[in-house]
Structures are given as structure tokens and as C-alpha cells.
Image (cartoon, helix red, strand yellow):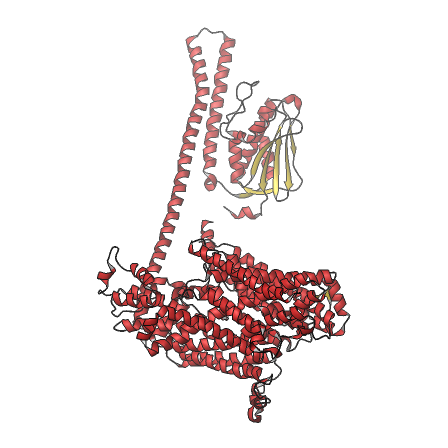
């Protein structure tokens, strides 16, 4: 492959990145932000996957088997609880305008300059190896691409500075970071261009790695099973595939997992993309599963590539860290190799850009600013312009950081594998976990505790990991520390106090965490917190209980003019005026207001705005320089907070009360509706009953009048008329009886007696009571009852009435010539089924539901006049309902109708009522 | 019944937190010693080492459960 192509490609790619970032910034300015969606957010978090992942994982897998994967399982575990932990960090950072991990710690422990500076120092020293790792990876991949197979063993060593590609790569990355990260000095303003560019890089590196994975697994070999089979033919590889011989065993596995759990939360660049650049907390809902999915995808081909690399290159000098690139190169697939090279370049540049920007903000806010404020050569600084000064400062810091990484790379990085270098950084970053996590959940964690804890952890890290890493390649004399300084074996950095059996990383992690956590807890328990510490502790721990407006603790006097002047110095006059406008009455002239006293809310707002620009500790110093009088005490702040939270609680209780009232009202309304409905039903019933009563009455009266007016009517006709009168009277009586029955039944169980009855007896009694009816019409009744008793719970009289009504109904509609009425009883599961079948005309489909309505008569053109009162079946329905049963009508096979009543068996669940 | 609904909606935000913590504990157990040691060895399943298969399947399962818990909207 021509060298110019390999050199030009990254430049073209960086140009593309810059174009993407430029477009994203433009869109952000016109209000069509690209970052306000969970997918870009997730992809930007994937800046976690650096050259370590891209090249180093394969190298690690080739040595140790599966242990590389712990670095990605840890973040998966943390992502599960992101909604609980990271959301709290985001909320705190938003409320306090925290812009870096150092500022977070400083702010929590009483806006301490000392802690901010300390955390920044640890971050810079700790991340330097990590930046070196990226430079090493990029330059090694470059060399591999240019001079494969000769130069694939590692970066070119010992070349002159200007001839070293890594130097130029470092310079290029610094320029890029400066272009993206230092155009605006307020770090709370999101760097949307950077985020979108990083998200894009995440796509490139994932696709590139998947491409080479598919190539190796499915083109070089015939799928994973084939690859594994080849690998198992070699004894050494066979061992690699099982977990048994992993160095350090399960302790090391757990240690690496814990390290990566700390890293995903507290690496400065992760804090930058997950917390500072977060637009909406809700994006975590997607990120907490999508990010682990990204990690899973980028890891799925690591082991196959490592196995294929070992099979392919075996004992050749090709470094396992370069297998990703070397495999497609060796197969002559140069286009794929170039793409892979770009993927690795993406992974490295993404990390360097975000990490240096995050560190630069930290260094300028938490190291330089406090120093600058102390020097107080204001006239000189003012002439230069403070804002300009800060921006140039940050640019300088970025260059310095990249150079520091480069120096580390030149000194030692060449002898270490990528993952080993990265793990050194991880242990350093893990030192942030105790002060932050304890600080977020335990109000008692105090500033002295945090200071001592950080110092102890960092010192142990430096002694057990960092210093040995400098010494091993022979840069520092190895003598003093081998086997312990001055021959004191207890101080051996790899077996401190005689602790053996752990790998160096786990060993360092254990001792540093012990020192760190132990110091914080013990010292916090022994010391008293200052007012500002207690206030901040309460605000951090209870962040979800309070609103943003609550964080005020200035009660001294400051004029509005002073506040404006202070703000203008750091954030520019434009933004100072805007910040002021919120707190001045509408239409008030700021010039006039300048002499007046600033409201407490304005002073607090000013401090928060300053925090975003120069860090919380410096902001506090600056504000205290213009406020005369004391800051509020802890009790004072708590009073204000409690008043607010009480108000919130009252309003919540009020809301709850009104919700209850609303519900009661709606229940009442429903009851009222029901009552109205019942009233209407009653009216209808009364009018229907009156109507039904009037018909027989009218005919009785008509015939009676005829009889009265015609005394000389002949005997036969008179008899016929009297017969009508008697029949109509009977009908009237029956009707009235049934109305009475119905009303008695409507009243429900209050007037009934619940007892266990045998349905067979009921059927017999019902049949006896109706025997006269059957005889009158010359109909036979066929009874079909089982041997065993059929017990139900119920009121015997009502049930008999049910049977009588059904039978008399059957009598009315049956045709005597077509056969007998049949009543049968059977048990179906937990129900008894009573079935009365007649040989009448049957019931048409559409009438089957309605026959049970009160006064419903089936209009029968042949019969002309209705035969019943229309109440019998309504009563049946009511009785079965009250006996927890069902009734329905169906057409019998022989053409008649069947009425089927189902009643639950006694002893079932329904029967304890009554 | 309306009462039951109200109780459930009051409980639901905290129940998401509880579920997440429980899932965290389960995932931590699945991906560490001693459960892990059950799969260490050179046995194959479908031609793939069981440890590799187990780790990725457990991982995918954890991701799926996280997604499931997070996608359930709680009512206010």
C-alpha cells in the first residue's frame, strides 16, 4: 500500500469529523440540536471503547483467554443501576453547575480548592498513561500498515523526535481537541460538535471491528466452530479456551470488573460525556441497555480474532496487539486493512479528544484559577482580558497533556501491552469512587477524610503501580524497589506487607482502596464538618428532594452593580446582562439599579454561573469578595430549605386530599346516576303494570255492563259472558300475585331463608303443584332426576316457585299432541342443571334474551292474544340470579323450547354468603 | 378496585429501583465466581467453548432485562 495513502487517509478522516462537528454546532445554534436524542448520547458514551478495546483486547485475549471481557462486563453491571446512580450525579451536576469530576469532589466537600486541585492532579497523572496508550496504538498500527510484516512488532523505537509519527499524531490530535473544546469558556455549555463527532467515531470503530471479525471468522475460516476446532488441535490454545489457567484466577477477574465499574463512572472523559454533555436524564433509559449492547457487539469477535491470529502468526514477531490489522494485511485484503486502521484511529482519537478537553477544563478551573486568584495581578490580567486568558490557558493545557502522554509513550509504553498500560490508569481513576459515592449517599463524609483518602489511595497507587511501571523498562534504576526498598521485603511494591498471590493490578487496587475508603470513613467519623460542608453534603445527598431554587446561602450585602461587574469580567457583558435581567423587575433600568442591593437569589445565580466557568471553589472565592457580611450558617440554610420542603409537602398533601375528594365526588355521582336509573325503571314498571291491569279490568267491566243492560239475554250467552268475567278476574288475580311475588323477590335475601335443599325434592314439589294444570290440558309430564341428591343452597319456596313458573310456562306453550313436557336434572361439574323442555313453537333467536324482561311477550300472530302475564320468566331470572346461578333459553332438538337453569353445588365458594 | 390501582401507581417508581438493584445483584452473581467456574473447562456446545457461550448469553440476557425494566413507563 502506498505510504502517502496511509498518511493522507487519517487527515481526510479528521477533516470529515470536523465537518460533522461543524454542522452539529451550526444546528445547535439554530435550535435543531442533534444531540438531543438517546442514540447519539449512547454512541458518545461508547468513547469508552478506545484503542485498548480495538487493538488491546485481542492482545489480551491471545495471552489470557476470556479475562479481557471483564472490562466490559463491569460497565454493563453499572449501566443497570445508572438510573439510580448516574441520574443522581447528573442532577447534582446540573444544579451546582459542576463541569468536571474534580469540581464534583471539590463542590461536595465544601467547595474546597485543595480537594479540587488534588483530584485534578490525580486525574492528570493517572490519565497520562492512557493517552500514551492511544498514541502507541495509532503509531504501531501505522507502522504495521506501512511495513508489514517486518515492522508489525511494535512502534518504531529510538527515532528522532521529528521523524516519529507518533509525535505528529499527537500534535494533530491536540489541534483537533483545541478546535473542538476551547471555543467557549463556559464549560457548562455543551460541546455539541465534539459529542456528535465522537458518536460518529463510535459507529466507525464498531463497524470496522465487526467487519474484520466477520472476515476472520467466516472468510478465513468456515465459521466459529471451524475456528475453534482448528484451535483445539494445539495444546496451548486449548488451554486458552478454558478459564482454568487464567493468571490470578477469579480474584483477578473480580478485581478487573470492579475497576471497570469505577472507570465507566469516574473516568474524566466518561464524566464529560455522560454527565456534563447529558441533555435529558430520560436518555439514560435507552443508554442503560443500548450501551451494554454496543459493548457486547464490539467484543463478540475478540476471541475469534485472537485465536485466528495465534494460529496464523504463532511464533512470528507479530505482536498480538496488532492481530486485528495484521490478519487482513497478511491475507492481502488491503482495503479492509485500511478501514480497520481508520477504526482504530477513530477509537484512539475519540478518547484523546474528549479526555484532553475534560482534563483541560479541570486543570484550568481547579489548578490555575485558584492560583490566578491568589496572585491578584489584576491590572495585567484585565488588560489581556480574562476570558481570552482562560481560553488560551486551556489550549496550552491541551497541548501540554498530549505532550505528557507522548513523553510517557516515549519512555516506557513500548515495552508494555496496551491493556496493561490502561489498567494502570484505571486504578488511579478508581480512587475517585470512594469520595464521590460516599459523598453522594452519606452526609457525614467530611473534607479532611476525603483529602486523606485521596492522598493515601494515590500514594499507594503510585508506589505499587506507577513507579514500578517507570522502573521496569530500565528508565529508573530497578534496584531500590525490587524485593522492597533497602531490602525491606514488607515494602515490596508487588507484595506490600507480604501480600502475595494477587496480580499487580488487583494487589494495587486492594491496598489503595483499603487506604482510601478506610481514611475517609475513619477520619469523617472523627472530625466535625464546617457549615459549608454540611450544607453541600445535605444538598448532594438529598438532591432529589429539593428544587434548584433552594440552593442559596448568601445573606450579606452586595450591590447589583458589583454582581454585574463580576460576571462581566468572567462571562462577558452580554451574558452578565442576561443573568441579571431575570432578577430585576420588568422594565427596570440596570444602570439605575446598580446601586441597589442585590437579592439573595441573584447572588446565588451569579455564583452558579461563575462555577460553570471557573469552578465552584474559585466561584465561591470571587463571590465572597464582593459580598459584605457572612455566608449563611448551616442552620440558616437548612431553615430555608426546610421551609421550602415543608411547603412542598403541604402542597403534596393538599393535592392528595383533593384527589381523594375528586374520587368521592365521582363515586357519589355514579351512585346518583344509578338511583336515577332505578327510579326510571320503577316508573316504567308501574306504568306497565297499570297497563296490564287495565286490560282484564276493561273486559270485565265491558261484559258486566252488557250483562246489566241486557237482563233478558239468553242463558247460553249469559253463561259465556260470565265465563269471560271469571277468567279475566282469575287472570287479574294471577297478575297481582305475580307482581307481589316479583316485588318480594326484588327485595332479595332479606326476607328469605338460606338452607341446603335437594333439587330433586324441589322438582317433585313443583311438579305436584302444577299437576292440575297438566291434567287440564291433557299433557304428560316426564320427570328425569338422578339417583344421588343434588344439593344447592337456597330458599326452598323460591326454588319451587322457579320450577312452577317454568312448568306452567311449558304447559302454556306446549302442544299436547306432540308429546310430553320433560323436566330433567343433571350434575355438570360444580353445577346442577335443571332443564325444562316443551313441544311448543320454540323461541326465535332474537327473542331469547328478551323473554326474561318484565312484561315481555312474544308476539305470536297465530295465538293473537298473549297467554301469560309476561312476568313469570322475569321472576325466574331474578330467582336464579339471587341463587348465584344462570338461566337461558335454547331451542330443543325436537322443535320446542328448553329453559336451562344452572345452580352452583352446595359447598362451593358461593355458599358461605347469607 | 380503584383503590388497588392507586396503590400500585404510588408504588411503581420505587419498584423500578428495586428491580434494577435486584437485577444488578443477579448479574453480579452470574458473571463471577463461583457460578462462572461451572463453565470453566474445555467442553464445547455447538462447537463453541461453553464459557464463551455462557458469558455472552448471560450478558445478552442481562441487557434484555435491563431494557425491559427501563422501557416500562411508570404512571404518576
Image position of A121 (left or right of B55):
left
Residue A382 screen position, x and y as percent:
32, 72
Observer able to see residue A437:
no
In this rendering, is residue A712 above or below A740?
above
| Residue A204 lies in quadrant | bottom right
In this rendering, is residue A250 above or below A861?
below
State the residue at coordinates (57%, 35%). Answer: A887
Farthest residue, direction right: A233
Image position of A66 (left or right of A737):
right
| Residue A397 lies in quadrant | bottom left
State the residue at coordinates (50%, 83%). Answer: A459
Residue closer to the observer: B35 or A870 = B35
Residue A600 screen position, x and y as percent:
28, 65
| Residue A191 lies in quadrant | bottom left
Residue A473 screen position, x and y as percent:
60, 83
Quadrant that contains the N terminus of chain A: bottom right
Amino acid at each position: 500500500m502506498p505510504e502517502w495513502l496511509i498518511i493522507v487517509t487519517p487527515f481526510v478522516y479528521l477533516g470529515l469529523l470536523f465537518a460533522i462537528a461543524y454542522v452539529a454546532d451550526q444546528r445547535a445554534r439554530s435550535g435543531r440540536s442533534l444531540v438531543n436524542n438517546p442514540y447519539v448520547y449512547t454512541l458518545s458514551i461508547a468513547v469508552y471503547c478506545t484503542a485498548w478495546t480495538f487493538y488491546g483486547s485481542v492482545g489480551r485475549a491471545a495471552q489470557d483467554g476470556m479475562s479481557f471481557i471483564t472490562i466490559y462486563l463491569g460497565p454493563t453491571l453499572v449501566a443497570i443501576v445508572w438510573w439510580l446512580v448516574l441520574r443522581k450525579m447528573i442532577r447534582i451536576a446540573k444544579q451546582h453547575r459542576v463541569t468536571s469530576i474534580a469540581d464534583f469532589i471539590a463542590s461536595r466537600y465544601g467547595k474546597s480548592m485543595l480537594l479540587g486541585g488534588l483530584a485534578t492532579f490525580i486525574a492528570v497523572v493517572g490519565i497520562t498513561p492512557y493517552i500514551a496508550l492511544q498514541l502507541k496504538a495509532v503509531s504501531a498500527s501505522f507502522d504495521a500498515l506501512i511495513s508489514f510484516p517486518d515492522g508489525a512488532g511494535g512502534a518504531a523505537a529510538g527515532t528522532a523526535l521529528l521523524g516519529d509519527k507518533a509525535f505528529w499524531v499527537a500534535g494533530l490530535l491536540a489541534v483537533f481537541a483545541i478546535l473542538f473544546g476551547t471555543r467557549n469558556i463556559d464549560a457548562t455549555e455543551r460541546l455539541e460538535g465534539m459529542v456528535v463527532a465522537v458518536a460518529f467515531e463510535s459507529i466507525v470503530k464498531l463497524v470496522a471491528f465487526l467487519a474484520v471479525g466477520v472476515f476472520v471468522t467466516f472468510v478465513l475460516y468456515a465459521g466459529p466452530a471451524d475456528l475453534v476446532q482448528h484451535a483445539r488441535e494445539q495444546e496451548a490454545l486449548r488451554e486458552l479456551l478454558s478459564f482454568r489457567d487464567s493468571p490470578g484466577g477469579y480474584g483477578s477477574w473480580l478485581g478487573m470488573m470492579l475497576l471497570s465499574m469505577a472507570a465507566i463512572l469516574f473516568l474524566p472523559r466518561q464524566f464529560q460525556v455522560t454527565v456534563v454533555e447529558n441533555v435529558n436524564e430520560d436518555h439514560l433509559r435507552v443508554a442503560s441497555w443500548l450501551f451494554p449492547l454496543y459493548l457486547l457487539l464490539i467484543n463478540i469477535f475478540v476471541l475469534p480474532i485472537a485465536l485466528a491470529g495465534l494460529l496464523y502468526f504463532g511464533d512470528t514477531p507479530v505482536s498480538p496487539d496488532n492481530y486485528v490489522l495484521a490478519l487482513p494485511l497478511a491475507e492481502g485484503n488491503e482495503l479492509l486493512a485500511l478501514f480497520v486502521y481508520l477504526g482504530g484511529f477513530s477509537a484512539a482519537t475519540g478518547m484523546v479528544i474528549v479526555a484532553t478537553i475534560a482534563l483541560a477544563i479541570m486543570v484550568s478551573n481547579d489548578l490555575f484559577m485558584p492560583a490566578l486568584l491568589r496572585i491578584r495581578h489584576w491590572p495585567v490580567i484585565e488588560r489581556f482580558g480574562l476570558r481570552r486568558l482562560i481560553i488560551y490557558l486551556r489550549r496550552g493545557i491541551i497541548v501540554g497533556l498530549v505532550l505528557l502522554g507522548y513523553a510517557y509513550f516515549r519512555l516506557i509504553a513500548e515495552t508494555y501491552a496496551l491493556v496493561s498500560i490502561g489498567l494502570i490508569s484505571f486504578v488511579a481513576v478508581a480512587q475517585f469512587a470512594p469520595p464521590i459515592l460516599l459523598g453522594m449517599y452519606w452526609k457525614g463524609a467530611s473534607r479532611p477524610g476525603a483529602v486523606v483518602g485521596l492522598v493515601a489511595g494515590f500514594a499507594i497507587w503510585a508506589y505499587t503501580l506507577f513507579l514500578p511501571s517507570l522502573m521496569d523498562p530500565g528508565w529508573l534504576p530497578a534496584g531500590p524497589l525490587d524485593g522492597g526498598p533497602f531490602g525491606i521485603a514488607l515494602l515490596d511494591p508487588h507484595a506490600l506487607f507480604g501480600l502475595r498471590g494477587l496480580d499487580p493490578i488487583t494487589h494495587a487496587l486492594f491496598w489503595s482502596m483499603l487506604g482510601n475508603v478506610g481514611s475517609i470513613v475513619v477520619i469523617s467519623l472523627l472530625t466535625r464538618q464546617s457549615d459549608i460542608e454540611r450544607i453541600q453534603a445535605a444538598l448532594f445527598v438529598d438532591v432529589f428532594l429539593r428544587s434548584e431554587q433552594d440552593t442559596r446561602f448568601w445573606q450579606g450585602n452586595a450591590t447589583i452593580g458589583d454582581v454585574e461587574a463580576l460576571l462581566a469580567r468572567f462571562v462577558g457583558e452580554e451574558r452578565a446582562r442576561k443573568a441579571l435581567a431575570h432578577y430585576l423587575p420588568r422594565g427596570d433600568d440596570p444602570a439605575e439599579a446598580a446601586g441597589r442591593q442585590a437579592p439573595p437569589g441573584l447572588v446565588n445565580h451569579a455564583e452558579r454561573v461563575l462555577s460553570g466557568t471557573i469552578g465552584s471553589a474559585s466561584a465561591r472565592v470571587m463571590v465572597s469578595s464582593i459580598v459584605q457580611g457572612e455566608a449563611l450558617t448551616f442552620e440558616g440554610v437548612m431553615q430555608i430549605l426546610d421551609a421550602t420542603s415543608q411547603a412542598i409537602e403541604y402542597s403534596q398533601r393538599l393535592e392528595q386530599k383533593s384527589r381523594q375528594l375528586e374520587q368521592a365526588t365521582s363515586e357519589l355521582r355514579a351512585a346518583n346516576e344509578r338511583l336515577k336509573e332505578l327510579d326510571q325503571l320503577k316508573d316504567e314498571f308501574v306504568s306497565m303494570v297499570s297497563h296490564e291491569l287495565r286490560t282484564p279490568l276493561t273486559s270485565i267491566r265491558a261484559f258486566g255492563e252488557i250483562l246489566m243492560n241486557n237482563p233478558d239475554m239468553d242463558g247460553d250467552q249469559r253463561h259465556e259472558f260470565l265465563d269471560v268475567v271469571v277468567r279475566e278476574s282469575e287472570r287479574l288475580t294471577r297478575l297481582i300475585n305475580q307482581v307481589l311475588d316479583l316485588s318480594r323477590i326484588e327485595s332479595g335475601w332479606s326476607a328469605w331463608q338460606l338452607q341446603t335443599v335437594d333439587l330433586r325434592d324441589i322438582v317433585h314439589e313443583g311438579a305436584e303443584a302444577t299437576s292440575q294444570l297438566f291434567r287440564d290440558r291433557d299433557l304428560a309430564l316426564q320427570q328425569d332426576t338422578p339417583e344421588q341428591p343434588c344439593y344447592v343452597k337456597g330458599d326452598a319456596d323460591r326454588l319451587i316457585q322457579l320450577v312452577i313458573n317454568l312448568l306452567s310456562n311449558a304447559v302454556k306453550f306446549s302442544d299436547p299432541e306432540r308429546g310430553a313436557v320433560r323436566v330433567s336434572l343433571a350434575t355438570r361439574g360444580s353445577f346442577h342443571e335443571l332443564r325444562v323442555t316443551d313441544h311448543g313453537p320454540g323461541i326465535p333467536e332474537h327473542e331469547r334474551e328478551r323473554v326474561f324482561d318484565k312484561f315481555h311477550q312474544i308476539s305470536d300472530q297465530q295465538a293473537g292474544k298473549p297467554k301469560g302475564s309476561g312476568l313469570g320468566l322475569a321472576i325466574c331470572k331474578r330467582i336464579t340470579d339471587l341463587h348465584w346461578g344462570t338461566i337461558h333459553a335454547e331451542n330443543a332438538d325436537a322443535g320446542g323450547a328448553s329453559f336451562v337453569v344452572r345452580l352452583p353445588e352446595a359447598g362451593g365458594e358461593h355458599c358461605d354468603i347469607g | 378496585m380503584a383503590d388497588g390501582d392507586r396503590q400500585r401507581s404510588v408504588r411503581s417508581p420505587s419498584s423500578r429501583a428495586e428491580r434494577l438493584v435486584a437485577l444488578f445483584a443477579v448479574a453480579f452473581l452470574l458473571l463471577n465466581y463461583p457460578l462462572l467456574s461451572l463453565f470453566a473447562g474445555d467442553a464445547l456446545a455447538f462447537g463453541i467453548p461453553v464459557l464463551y457461550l455462557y458469558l455472552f448469553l448471560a450478558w445478552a440476557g442481562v441487557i434484555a432485562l435491563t431494557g425491559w425494566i427501563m422501557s416500562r413507563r411508570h404512571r404518576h
